[in-house]
Image: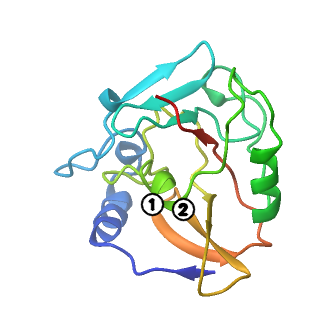
Amino acid sequence: MKIYPLTLRFVACAMLALFSPWTLAQTCVAGIQASNPTSVYVVDSANGTVTDTRTGLMWDRCARGLSGVGCATDTASTFNWKAALNAAATIGTYKGYNDWRLPNLKELRSLVEECRINPSINEFAFPNTPALVFWSGSPYIGDPSSAWCVDFLVGNTIIDQRSTAYRVRLVRAGL
């Protein structure tokens, strides 16, 4: 797995995590502005979707495999990259829509909450998101056996082998 250089944000968050892990689990680190505040999301609890009002993208509120209120039922599924693309392409009508897909890297990165770690995502909009790696649909051009991913433990963008099993969150065009 190739990991890109850690950001100053991660270093600051990691240091704070040593002293106040429970605070980081639910709120932004003091002095860091939320990049994805709850106010930018419209949560539709009836169908389990979340719309980002800035991008117009509609997201599955739960990682694939999770379900129920608060995405607390079952376990997040893992897929290699090809299976992740296939799962999105063959899902059919899901939550009232038939155009779900794997997000590209820019779209998936747009979910990273820069002010927090473990997980680095807005937990009101996306509850019980595993603080783990999620596939994007973006291949890595420098190596045909690799693709881009986002690690929601700390919000890093990484490249890994397409054969590795990671989690998936689906997206659609929305608005």
Q: Is residue 28 above or below residue 153?
A: above
Whole-percent x and y of residue 95?
69, 23
Image side of residue 139 versus residue 127, left or right: right
- The answer to whether marks 1 and 2 mark residues whose Cβ atoms lie closer than 8 Å is yes
Q: Nearer the viewer, residue 38 or 47?
A: 47
Whole-percent x and y of residue 134?
62, 57
Number of marks: 2
Q: Residue at x 27, y 50 (%)?
A: 29
Location of mark 1 (residue):
155
Question: Neighbour class for label 2 at 10 Å: few (<14), some, many (≥20)?
Answer: many
Tell me, yes or no, if residue 29 can be seen here: yes
Tell me, yes or no, if residue 118 can be seen here: no
Q: Residue furthest bottom?
A: 142
Q: Quadrant location of the N terminus? A: bottom right
Q: Nearer the viewer, residue 80 or 143?
A: 143
Image side of residue 22 versus residue 85, left or right: left
Q: Nearer the viewer, residue 54 or 15?
A: 54
Image side of residue 107 versus residue 102, left or right: left
Q: Amino acid at mark 2?
A: Asp
Corner quadrant of residue 60: top right
Q: Amino acid at mark 1?
A: Gly
Whole-percent x and y of residue 26?
39, 38
Q: Is residue 89 above or below residue 97?
A: below
Question: Neighbour class for label 1 at 10 Å: few (<14), some, many (≥20)?
Answer: many
Location of mark 2 (residue):
151
Whole-number angstrom distance, CA of label 1 to CA of label 2: 5 Å
The colouring scheme, among rainbow, by chain, secondary structure or one colour, is: rainbow
Whole-percent x and y of residue 76?
73, 44
Q: Residue at x 60, y 12 (%)?
A: 46
Q: Secondary structure at mark 2?
A: strand
